[in-house]
Image (spheres, helix red, strand yellow):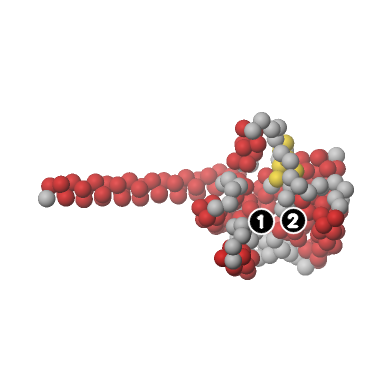
Amino acid sequence: MAYAGSAGTFLKRLIGFLLLGAIFLLLLSVAWVILYKYVNPPTTLTMMGDTLEGHSVKQTWRPLALVDVDMPRAVITAEDRDFCTHNGFDLKAIAAAMKANQEGGNLRGGSTISQQTAKNAFLWGERSYLRKGLEAWFTMLIEQIWGKRRIMEVYLNIAETGIHTYGVEEGARRYFDKGAGDLTRRQAAQIAAVLPSPQKRPGKNPSGQTRRYARNIEKWIRVVKDERLDACLGLVDR
């Protein structure tokens, strides 16, 4: 009987310890998100991985106010046309991804810009159900704490835009020898076109499918502007 009592006490202590640990991690994640609302992320796990592998990482922060307005419009066109109206998740895309996953093949995400930002800022790149679960949690947090403009600003500064190149500022310098504030509409479209596969798609003088995709993005940028699909960003045309 004494043994049973000791085992019960140990189990209660273990459950209490695990509960406290979970609460601590939850509060830590909220504090981390609040910090990044005001402090620009100094690095990401993906950048750190590049550095540990001996590569030189290029990334220069550029405030959204100093990025050409066609650049956020281009990524809305390419990545998430409902960015300003959803709560961080595209339910139709998620349903399509779940169906594809059930039918076999590689694990797919159906990620919005908000989800991609959560992943890039706080998590690792390898796909797994654990990462997708954490991604959903951080997506909810940044939607509530950051707001859309900050989400777009962070996304444009930490998304991979080339081999060991991060952010649209370094992407613009890499491909066009200019800053992200001086991009033409076509150049913004070409940078957006490489985002799904930045290590394989050329941002300058693209050909084939990448070229056609960039041209399509370029055409849609005006639609994003005219239909106010970028309304949540408060962009001011110069």
Left or right? Give the position of 96 relative to 189: left
Left or right? Give the position of 108 relative to 156: left
Q: Residue at x 77, y 51 (%)?
A: 194
Number of numbered discs on residues: 2
Residue 67 in view (yes/no): no
Residue 212 figure quarter: bottom right
Q: CA distance from mark 1 to mark 2?
A: 8 Å
Label 2, secondary structure: give it.
Answer: helix
Q: Amino acid at mark 2?
A: Val
Q: Residue at x 69, y 47 (%)?
A: 159
Callout 1: 10 Å neighbours few (<14), some, many (20+)? many
- Residue bearing the label numbered 2: 75
Dot placed on the residue nearer the N-terminal end, 1 or 2 = 2
- Labelled pair 1, 2 in contact (Cβ < 8 Å): yes
Q: Which mark is residue 113?
A: 1
Give x and y (percent) for residue 7: 21, 48
Residue 177 in view (yes/no): yes
Give x and y (percent) for residue 125: 61, 47
Give the residue at the far left of this rendering: 1
* Image vertical order of residue 235 relative to residue 63, above or below: below
Q: Residue at x 78, y 49 (%)?
A: 201
Give x and y (percent) for residue 79: 71, 58
Callout 2: 10 Å neighbours few (<14), some, many (20+)? many
* Image vertical order of residue 219 relative to residue 54, above or below: below
Label 1, secondary structure: give it.
Answer: helix
Q: Residue at x 31, y 50 (%)?
A: 15
Give x and y (percent) for residue 92: 63, 69
* Image vertical order of residue 48 relative to residue 79, above or below: above
